[in-house]
Image: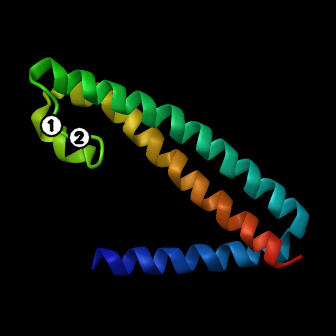
Amino acid sequence: MIESLFVLGGLAAVGLFGLAAVWLTPHLLVELGLGALGAGFVIGLLAGLRYHVLLYRSLAARSAPPPHWWISPVEHHARLNRADLARMTPWFVAGAIGFCLSCGGGLAAIAGLLSI
């Protein structure tokens, strides 16, 4: 069920970016999209780095972190106490926002380029 919501959300986003390409000038849409893409990369990179450092420190304080812990870090949230999890959650959310901003900016830039 959730996968179909993701697909529908993606199709709606593509449609909205297509409409934005018609309403805005294509060059402005490309510039805004690339700006959002760059901002999302910076936000996501910095927040993701801070999140992974905090997670590593929290896991290392209890025991040695498992091998390849960074591949699926959310699985290790259950091993943390509330204080550690509360300290990491804002960075986790900021990284997700940066990722979404990057995706949206990339779609906007592509929509603008396709309409030139």
- Callout 2 secondary element: loop
State the quadrant of the C terminus: bottom right
> Mark 1 and mark 2 in contact (Cβ < 8 Å)?
yes
Residue 102 lies, in percent from the top left, at 60, 53
User: Looking at numbered disc 1 in the image, what kind of residue is underneath it?
Assistant: Pro
Residue drawn where x is 90% and y is 68% of the image: 25
- Which residue position holds label 1? 66
Give the vertical position of 50 relative to 102 (above or below). Answer: above
Residue 64 placement: quadrant:
top left
Residue 56 placement: quadrant:
top left
- Residue 114 shows which numbered tag? none
State the quadrant of the N terminus: bottom left
* Residue in front for this viewpoint, 55 or 19: 55
Residue 51 lies, in percent from the top left, at 37, 32
- Is residue 16 left or right of 2 when viewed as pictured? right
Residue 114 lies, in percent from the top left, at 80, 78
- Callout 1 secondary element: loop
- Which residue position holds label 2? 69
Residue drawn where x is 12% and y is 40% of the image: 78
User: Looking at numbered disc 2 in the image, what kind of residue is underneath it?
Assistant: Trp
Q: CA distance from mark 2 to mark 1?
A: 6 Å
- Is residue 2 left or right of 90 when viewed as pictured? left
Residue drawn where x is 38% and y is 39% of the image: 92
Q: How many residues crowd around disc 1 within 10 Å: few (fewer than 14), some, or many (20 or more)? A: few
Q: How many residues crowd around disc 2 within 10 Å: few (fewer than 14), some, or many (20 or more)? A: some
